[in-house]
Amino acid sequence: MKKKLLTALSFIVCFSAFSQKVLQLEECRQMALTHNKSLQMAQESIIAAREMKKAAFTQFLPNFSANGAYTWNQKNISMLAEDALLPVGTKMADGSFGFSQSQVSNGWTTVNGQATPLDANNQPFNPKTNPEKIQWKSYALLPKEALEFDVKNIFVGSIGFVQPIFMGGKILELYHLAKYGENLAVAQKETKVTELLLEVDEAYWRVVSVENKVALAREYRNLIAKVDSNVAIMIEEGVATKSEALKIKVKLNEADIAMTKAEDGLNLSRMVLNELCGIPLEEVYKLSDTDVLNETTIAKIIPIEEAISNRPEMAALKQVENMAISNEKIMLSRFMPNIGLAGNYLLSNPNVYNGYQNKIGGMFSFGIVANIPLFHFGDRFHTLNAAKSQHKIATLKLEETKEKMQLQIKQTSYKVIESQKKRSATQRNIEQAEENLRYATEGFEAGVITSTDLLGAQTAWLSAKSENIDASIDVKLCNLYLEKSLGTLKAPTLNNISK
């Protein structure tokens, strides 16, 4: 029964190990790029910036619009307060309005040889300066209703367009601003991609490092357990003391604690990588790069100018500088006139196009509108100076970042070389520690070396192995940082993701 149970458990363990998922670094990168919410938000920012650029382009085109209004008025408009009487006169030879003696009731007299009318007191007067003294015989009636207009219900409508002709260059620069905004959004997304790849690679190699530390802790624990077993036999034979056995028990407990800590660290490291890749936190997998002793392909050093041009951060700052230049040009355009062409078709009811009619009537109108700024207490000068300062700030920021990138490339290059030297040194230490452990083991078994010396050799072997793991991982991470500083840390599927 026990044999059957052990066989079944062994089969389950072997099947689980066989079916365990194996992840490669590129797979982790791809899953992280697909899962990351920040990249999804960055992609939406690109779409928004692209739509804003399209909206800015429409400002070059005419703007068509339709308007309508209805108004109800309580009263009509009347040009007269009451009926009016218009005197009936004569058109004179010079074309002016006048009258003859038969058209008025005034008396007449002769003054300086000319006929002059008399007022009610028989005093001569000038009809041009005192027309109120004229006594007309005939009048024409002008009724009040003839000059009353129905405006109780007014309907107004228009269809028109406005076409910019010259706006001082501000429309062109607004379009450039939108285009630079799109480029900035793309550069910012590429920066996020680089940062995410760096974070994923760090988490990946951290898991690899801890996996090797766990395996090393198990191997170290087995070595101490073997010594513990040998010492127990030696106590029975009377060639060892219980004091030695207690020292080894303490070391064995310390090894168990170290192994537990390493396993806990492995679980936590896996959770971090799982979260980045969008994998359930409790899922366990196997990484393909478990052998840290594999040689790392060091990134090829390229010219500094080329490396700086590859950096998305530099591309983003360049777009910020371009935006500052366009903003300065927009501020300058405020000094220039704005000229536009406008056209409309107007509809109204009532209309006055052919007398006053209570029906819909319309007409076309076209015109050119110009606005020339003259004076506003220096407002435009101040905004232009502010834009120039912003442009200078953007340029200085670009130059400062370029200098820092040059320093970063130099530093990461030196760190790669230093990490390689450190790994070579740790590999030599391993060879010496293994040889020392072999001699100590043989001496202990021969009875010429104490268990304390053997434990010391095992501890030195553990330290050399652990330092070699750290140095090997450090080479990979330093190479990763070098790729980032050179601008060559890019995802193979970046083009597909940015669509």
Image (cartoon, rainbow, N blue to C red):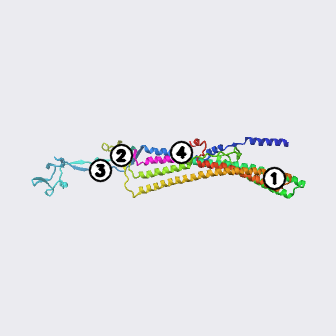
What residue did someone put label 2 on?
368
> Of the numbered discs in the image, which one, if any, rests on residue 440?
1
- The residue carrying pointer 1 sits among few (fewer than 14), some (14 to 19) or many (20 or more) residues within 10 Å by Cα, namely many
At horizontal 75% and vertical 42% (from top left) the residue drawn is: 17
How far apart in space, not on screen, are marks 3 and 1 (Cα)?
126 Å
How far apart in space, not on screen, are marks 3 and 2 (Cα)?
35 Å
**Image depth: mark 1 or mark 4 in front:** 1
- The residue carrying pointer 2 sits among few (fewer than 14), some (14 to 19) or many (20 or more) residues within 10 Å by Cα, namely few
> Of the numbered discs in the image, which one, if any, rests on residue 79?
3
**Residue 254 percent coordinates (x, y):** 78, 55
Q: Decide: marks 1, 4 in contact (CB < 8 A)? A: no
Looking at the image, tell me whether mark 2 or mark 1 is earlier in sequence order.
Answer: 2
How far apart in space, not on screen, are marks 3 and 4 (Cα)?
61 Å
Q: Is residue 267 visible?
A: no
**SS at mark 2?**
strand
Q: Decide: marks 3, 4 in contact (CB < 8 A)? A: no
